[in-house]
Image (cartoon, grey):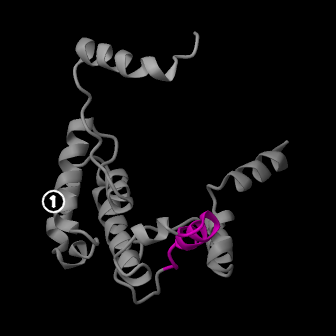
Amino acid sequence: MPATPAAELPRQLDRLERLYGAPEPVLPRGALDWVLWENAAYLVAPERRKEAYRALKKLAGRSGAGLLRVPRAQLLALAAGGGMLPEQRVEKWLDIAGTLANDFDGDLEAVLALPLAKARAATTARCTRPAPRPSDARQRTRPRSSRKSARSSALRRLPAAERCTRSTNSPARRASSTAARS
């Protein structure tokens, strides 16, 4: 297919709009909006995702701190309308709000102004949260396998930046385990 000259692009876009109608605007605008959009729902139709996103955005406010003030039962009710694994999504929402409040002073947009390497370091160092302490109320209730526990405890001893690259689902880890099986 030949490339479209830049001068003809507006005309072609007008023809497409007449044929298919105007496109719906993308809901997320800023960095926090995109994070909320991606975490609002799981395996649901786009309409349900939009509804869940709008409700989550309304609760979160501009800085995400609103999620920390909402009762957990209300968050669970909202998460239940957004598909599978509502408890895990509530935990994720609270982690996002806490990270925003503690590490970014409620302004995730400021990270976008940083050079790419610094922005990546600022956000990826937080990709794994520390293991829960025995007194922590959010501790898992189901037992882990001994192999996974050993791997998890080894990951906890690494600095936070290395945990992200050595997590169990990282491409490097999958590649090394595939090579070991061959």
Give yes or no for residue 130 being in the magenta stretch. yes
Q: Is residue 18 above or below residue 33?
A: above
Q: 34 and 173: which one is in front?
A: 34
**Could one spot residue 150 in this view of the protein?**
no
Residue 122 occupies which quadrant of the picture? bottom right
Left or right of 71? Residue 31 is right
Q: What residue is drawn where x is 28% and y is 72%?
A: 63
Residue 46 place in picture, x, y as percent: 27, 36
Name the amino acid type tagged 1: Ala
Locate the C terminus by quadrant.
top right
Q: What residue is drawn where x is 35% and y is 58%?
A: 30
Q: What residue is drawn where x is 26% and y is 11%?
A: 19
Residue 38 place in picture, x, y as percent: 37, 51
Q: Which residue is mark 1?
A: 77
Report the span colored magenta. 114-131
Q: Name the outermost residue toward the front.
A: 7
